[in-house]
Image (tube, rainbow, N blue to C red):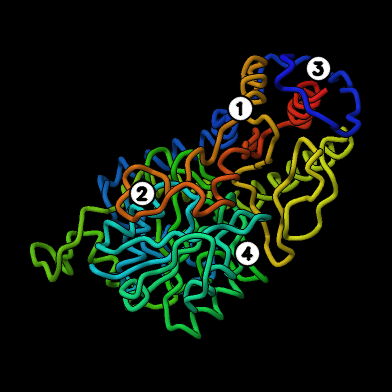
Amino acid sequence: MLESTRLVNRPSIAKPQATAKILDAVPMLDLQRQYQQIREDILAAVERVCSSQQFILGPEVEALEREIAALTGAASAVGCASGTEALWLALVAAGVKPGDSVITTAFSFFASASAIVRAGATPVFVDVDPGTLNLDATLVDRQLRDRPLRGRQLGTQQRENLCAILPVHLYGQCADMDAFDRIAEEFGVAIVEDAAQAIGAEWNGRGAGALGVTAAFSFYPTKNLSAYGDAGIVTTSRPEMAEHMRQLRNHGSPRRYYHNEFGWNGRMDAIQAAVLRVKRPHIADWNQSRRQHAATYDQLFASAGLTSNQTSNQPSNESCAPVRLLARSPQAKHVFHQYVIRAQHRDELRQFLAERKIGSEIYYPLPLHLQPVFSYLGLKAGDLPVSEQAAREVLALPMFPELTEAEIQCVVESIAEFYS
């Protein structure tokens, strides 16, 4: 290994043990394994749609909506074309309109903020909790009280027009919804969940999707519950919002060729709904497998001496540990859409893993407030330091239900070899 990648004063790291089976590669995600388990059911579902000749919306979508509402505990669900479309629908139904402002995290996928802009509003980026990397409710509260922060404060006009907060349940762990509920009640703002990565997750026993006035889910092919193309859904506790979203996804039309407002073509394809209906009964078991894989990763990292103990909602103070795990809230039932570590020499480690054909990904390499498209907001490097530091350190490791223990062991052994 190059000397530049070695650690100074590194902890004692156990020498990697040889795996029982030599592996040619460990993929970041392997959808083929899942498909082979449910292939016949999938083909039958697609045939059912083709025979019905009802390809957009229709009975399959309506059935999926009922099933997802039951899964999440929400009153209603509205199927749509993508997770991005779901975010836009959720925001508009919650009352976001042109000229408004919406607080959200700077550490998320672009759609979390672009949907705010599409609704005509201004995103207000706030930093994340250093342990979980979810939107920091304490900092949101300070922003609303107009107290000094390291970064820039909300302008007067933004405070007056602030109508919603969009927390993201990052990597499959719910944000601190107790805190956001208190903020919503005190300041009279709507909570819109970005639950794109969190189908099946819970907070204090309540399902993601039933924690805000509306919530957006993505069924992108990499998600825990995934379509065979783009699809999304919005859940809500308010039937009138569900009816509004059904119009918005269909060009603002309550009935064919009559339009009450400007909506969009955001309808869900029936084939995607049918595929999702085959997969939905498996989601609890698949999520449990993800939790078991995460526990295996945790144990192997600890046994290898790569991590230090971390039980609080703060990152470890032992900076000599080459790998740090994200904190897990005791109130949260995590579904591990991704298993993410914070790694010293992250980019060199990723290259090292790639050379051994071990998949990894960076979610996310550049915080939203530093994206060129948001330069008009006037934020600069240093304004949201926790998000910026996370972007330099996070690395997602292979995670999917069919992942084997031997593959996880191979990943951890390779990481131990890199740091040895």
Secondary structure beneath dot 4 equals strand
Secondary structure beneath dot 2 equals loop
The answer for how far apart the CA atoms under marks 1 and 4 are is: 33 Å
* Residue 162 lies in quadrant: bottom left
- For badge 3, the amino acid type reads Lys
Q: Residues within 10 Å of mark 3 (few under 14, many from 20)?
A: few
The residue carrying mark 4 is: 202
- For badge 1, the amino acid type reads Asp
The residue carrying mark 3 is: 21
Mark 3 vs mark 1: in front: 1
* Residue 295 lies in quadrant: top right
The answer for how far apart the CA atoms under marks 2 and 3 are is: 40 Å
The residue carrying mark 2 is: 82
Q: Is residue 272 above or below residue 241?
A: above
The answer for how far apart the CA atoms under marks 2 and 4 are is: 22 Å
Label located before the other in sequence (4 or 3): 3
Secondary structure beneath dot 1 equals helix
The answer for how far apart the CA atoms under marks 2 and 1 are is: 31 Å
